[in-house]
Structure formats: C-alpha cells, structure tokens
Amino acid sequence: MMGKWISKQRRYSDTTDRIRSKKVDVGNQKSNSLDYGMARKQAEDKWIGMFSVKSCHSDAVTSLCTSSSNFCISGSKDKTVVLQDVLNGVVLQKWKDHTQEVTKVRCSGNLVASTSRDLSVKIWKTDSQESEATLEGHKLVVTAVDFSADNQNVVTGSRDNFVKVWDVETEEVISEQSISRNLVTDVRWMKGENLIVQTSEDKMLKLWDPRTVEVVHSFPLQNQIQTCCDINGLYCLTGCNGFNGQGCQIHLWDIRQRAKLQEYRGHTETVSGCSFNEHTPGSHTFASCSHDGTVRFWQEHKQKHVSCEQLNVGTLTSIAALNKDTLLCGGFERGILLLRIGNCGQLVSSCE
C-alpha cells in the first residue's frame, strides 16, 4: 500500500513541479496559460485519493479551512498561515507575522483570519503579503474566530473566558462578554440568523447575540468538553473530547428548535474536527477526524459511520470539505491529507 502511495505521489509531484512557479488568480480559477491548464488537467486526471503537502509547513497543521473548490488556508505550529491551491500543490501566500503557534484559521471571501498563542488575531487579504489588521486584547491564547456576513466584524474566543466582537477596519472591540469557566474552543457566526454558536470546555453549546454579546440560549450541559463545531443553515455539529472509547461523540443540533437531534459514536479518542458535507441530496452528511487517527463519514439518520479510514499518520487536528466529493484533513504528520468521498459515501485513500 505504501509503495503504491509513494509511486503515485511521485507521479503527482512530477506534474505539480512544472506548475509550482506559476501565478494563480484566487478570484479566477481559469488558467492564465495553456501550459498551466494542461498541467492542471493532468494532475486532476492522475487523481490521488490521499497525498501530503509537506512543503507548505515545517511543523504540525493545527487548523484549516477552504475558500473555494480548490483553495485551502492552513495554520501551523510553525507560526505561519498558508494559502494554497491544494489540488495542484501550489502555495499562493505564506504569512509569517505571528510569533507563536497558529491555533485557528477562518476565511470569508478574500479575507482570512488567524488566531495564535501570541494572543493576537491577524486579518489578511488573499492578494496581499501584509496583514490588514491586528486585533489585540485577549489575555490568554486566542482559540477561535469567524467572520460576520458582511466581513466588517469578526468574533473571537479565548481561554481567558471572553467572547469579543471586533470592527475589522478600526481594530477595536465593539462588545465583549466574559463567563466563568467559558474556555472557548470554537465559534461560528450563523449569518442567516445573526447568531454566534460557541463551544467551550465548560461542556456547553451556547448561542450569542452578536449585537450585545449576550448569551440568548445555553443547551443542556453535556458529559464531555465540546471541542469543535460547524454549521450548515440552522444545523450545528459539535465534537467531544474523550479517550479509550469513552466520550468522543459527535452531536447534531437543530438551532431553531433548540434541540439535540442525534448522537454519533465511533471514535475512540477526542474528536478534533467536524465538517458538514452535502454529498447526499436531502440528507445531512458530514465528516469528522480524531486523535485516534481516523476520518469518519456520517449520514444524519445512521448512527454508525458510513465509512471509516485509518490514515496511519498520527494525531489528526482539523477537517474541512473542499467540495462535495473531497475532504481535507490536517495532522501532526505529512501536512495536509486529501480524501475522496466515493460511491455510497465510502472514503477513498488510494486511486480507484
């Protein structure tokens, strides 16, 4: 298996080496040259279900998100944030302003936000090497960030128990709130409902009003720390910590009904990332990754995962849907991994 992977990786590298130096316009995915277009087509024809991109970071990938059907933003322990055309292995931007480990990345349009153990939040534009804004005010590690619908504001969360809403242009805090033991693990801004969804080490999922930064609803206390979340319309996913098969659940929530719909079990260690993926029309599908080294693919009405892939690359840290058929996963080894969602929701980690 490993021999086949190395052979396929070498063929992929031969193709992408020829296009690595080419400039890519993030706003227009069409090739600027015939040669680039041909090389890109060859890379797609020689699809590799799973491959690593080691050149973008020199240390573990801690967080990633996607900005289009091709582009990925990743943050790392090496203190950098990278924008790349992940299907072709082309690094477009590498931002190096953080002085400590990057903890979370989010993107919206042509803006990227990153949080760090250096207690700051950086805002970047995808077409610029310089940061657009630096938000400072948290007293402990900043662990979460997300954009408002108009990109004029961001919400941040930290281990200092604070949730803050910022004006990106002025770099000032608009409003903030602290709750005892609310060590924030993740936040998502629900654009349609103008609500902020937040997970925490206090084992609760909370909904905030971004205008006043007040909690409008707290879901019932869970048995485990809520480690991560994702949203899709009026639905929310959360992952839990755990070990040796205890805990490690995934929960599906209906935000409008203020209800937990389902609980999913299968991971044997902490769930480190979860991501919706609308692979099956009319039904919620989603993926998760864990410290147990597996990626699992789920369907809403099936409590057991549809597919499970053991990647054998150590601890996994983050997962995101690149498109309806492709997942990205970050980890402590081998940089960023790519997986295809095959027929019937099966994960594919080698060429078919």
Image (tube, rainbow, N blue to C red):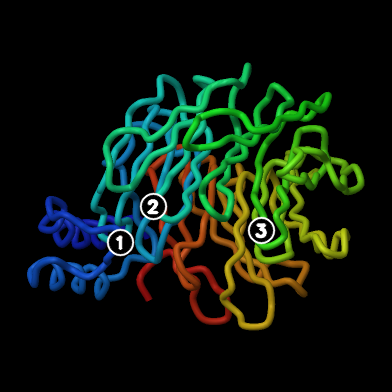
> Which residue position is annotated with label 3?
231
**Residue 110's disc number:** 2
Left or right of 61? Residue 84 is left
- Label 2 amino acid? Asn
Compared with 186, 34 (above or below) is below
Q: Nearer the viewer, residue 310 or 100?
A: 100
Compared with 85, 335 (above or below) is above
- Label 1 amino acid? Gly
Q: CA distance from mark 2 to mark 3?
A: 20 Å
> Which residue position is annotated with label 1?
27
Residue 34, how many percent across, how many down? 8, 72
Residue name at image x 23 percent, y 58 percent: 25
Compared with 177, 11 (above or below) is below
Residue 309, how many percent across, how many down? 54, 60
Q: Earlier in the sequence, mark 2 or mark 3?
A: 2
Residue 292, how many percent across, how many down? 61, 45
Q: Nearer the viewer, residue 349 or 262?
A: 262
Q: Residues within 10 Å of mark 1 (few under 14, many from 20)?
A: few
SS for dot 2: loop
